[in-house]
Image (cartoon, rainbow, N blue to C red):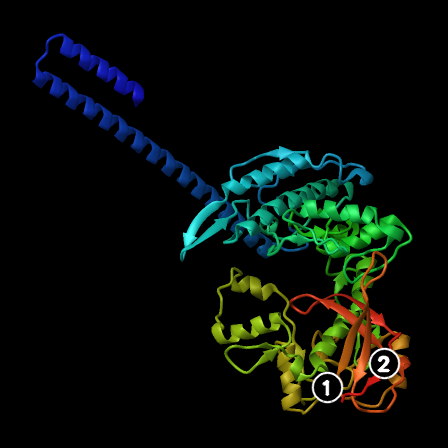
Amino acid sequence: MRACHRKCSHSVGSSKMSGQTEEDSKAADDSITDVRYNFCKDWVEKQNSECAKKSQQNKNDIQFIIQNNADRKKFLLSAAEDDATVPNGVGEPSVEPKAVKLQKLRTKDVRMECGWLSCNHVTEDYKEFQDHCRNHISDLQVSEEDGKVIYSCLWDSCKHSNTDFDEMCRHMNYHAYHGRLLGIGFNAQATLKLACCKKDSSLRNKLPVLKEDFCCLWVRCGSKFKSMQAFLDHVALHTHYAPRLTCSWAGCGATFPRAVLLTTHVRSHTGERLLACYHCGRHFATNRKIVDHRTRQNVHPSSEHTCSVCSFSYATAYLLRQHTRQHISQHACTLCDMSAPTLATLAQHVRYRHLPDHCRTHKCPTCEHKAITKSDLRKHIETHTKKRKKEDSDISDEEQGQKKRKRYACHMCEKDKVFSRGSRLTTHLVKVHGVQWPFGHSRFRYQISEDGMYRLTTTRYEILEVSKQIVDGYSGPKDSLSNTFEFNLEQKSKPTLTTPTSFEISLKGASSERRDASAVEITMCDVDEQGNIICSEVIRDVLLRDVQIG
């Protein structure tokens, strides 16, 4: 525009010097104004057309991805599991994975791909890949809704959005960390000779919600990071210089004979994963886990590895042994004759069956219901606001008929009355026949019979020690926990680099009856906001002393 202006001004000056009239000069100025206006108008129209073209191109790209994902999901649901040929996932490259040595699987030829829209950056340098993904933070799509600014991620098949910019920074940094895991998993397909994955690949880049910074809970540290990799590198320094190979993570204090065992243990605190399935994106902490993930999906219905309890088939004997542990109880409840296969299941049983009402601290704002955890409260609130609707399914009626449905039969009716769900048979047994489950059973359990029907079973598998403990101490149903007793909790020593915090527990009350400390066992549990147990420790050396309250 400036060059055009100088040229026109020079021509006007020349015309005046040649003796033209004032009217001619005014006409020349008008023509110059028209030239400027037409030039600006043409430039604006050109820019608008280019923006519209680019917007239409982005819209077409997004529509293509959505349609591709929908077609793939429909194919997976309609294909038979025994002879299905699963196509490549969304955006999977045509290159073949490299079979590298198992010791160098995580360091050699790791191909990392940027999944940002219209970005095809590929590199094997992890630091460069992290910087590249971090630069895409400035490319986040920004929109406004109800006066709030919303940031949206344009990574392939991600669709994550949030109003917190710091959360989006953590999200983009995690894409870089996840991209490296996918690169390792890509080569693992050839190195570990993995079977085909049949999961939906449209969820490959679906990341967990990162509400807070990654915080190091090592003793006297508390550092916070927005990058998962920076957080893991920081914790690795603590692990490398840990005195006496002791884990000083908050509430832990475990010791190990070798450094490699300590490093493996710390992953349970940090949530570090070593590789991911390149097809579906699921994270795994060991190579064995991803092998089981792929093998489990390729089991044949007529497999010889079949569970004798639930009749489920598994691809290998190892997977069958892992499954069988779910049917064998290894821990007994001290408040009733219930037994559970894991400590987490036993803690869940005590939380819901034996804790008094005052432990239900999460009150519903609409009614008088009180829940034990925030997760239970959220599910309860949905019953007030969300109506049950029959959602349209992408599976046709013919495809639904091909699926084998379970049928539950009542053994107490003259003619077997059949139900489509186990919960309906449970209601029928309780209300019609007045049946109650025996002590030690948390609910009715049903087992498949020879005719294919599921019928009631009271069989329970336990290890010998648990059965002996229940039989020797059996006295019918025991009293539940109550708030009759109160305890004092006094801190005796502060945590050090090698020892955790020491507490003394004393019993309040005016009773003069002495209690046998050897018969007392306390389980200390660390739980998250949802009430899930993170770690637990059983304390048997307990000091109980009565405190007179004046």
Give coordinates of residue 107: x percent, y percent: 76, 37
471 w.r.t. 207: above or below: below
Q: Residue at x 50, y 54 (%)?
A: 163
Residue nearest the observer in this picture, 322 or 246: 246
**Mark 1 neighbour density, 10 Å: few (under 14) some (14–19) many (20 or more):** few
| Quadrant of res 492 | bottom right
Answer yes or no: is residue 333 visible: no
Q: Residue at x 77, y 80 (%)?
A: 487
| Quadrant of res 41 | top left
Between the residue at mark 2 and the residue at mark 1, the CA separation in whole angstroms equals: 18 Å
Secondary structure, mark 2, is: loop
User: Left or right: where does residue 337 sit relative to residue 75?
Assistant: right
Secondary structure, mark 1, is: loop
Disc 2: which residue: 544
53 w.r.t. 411: above or below: above
Q: Which mark is residue 482?
A: 1
| Quadrant of res 350 | bottom right
532 w.r.t. 427: above or below: above
Residue nearest the observer in this picture, 273 or 217: 217
Give coordinates of residue 25: x percent, y percent: 12, 17
Extreme residue in the top direction = 18
Residue nearest the observer in this picture, 513 or 354: 513
Type of amino acid under label 2: Leu
Residue nearest the observer in this picture, 63 or 207: 207
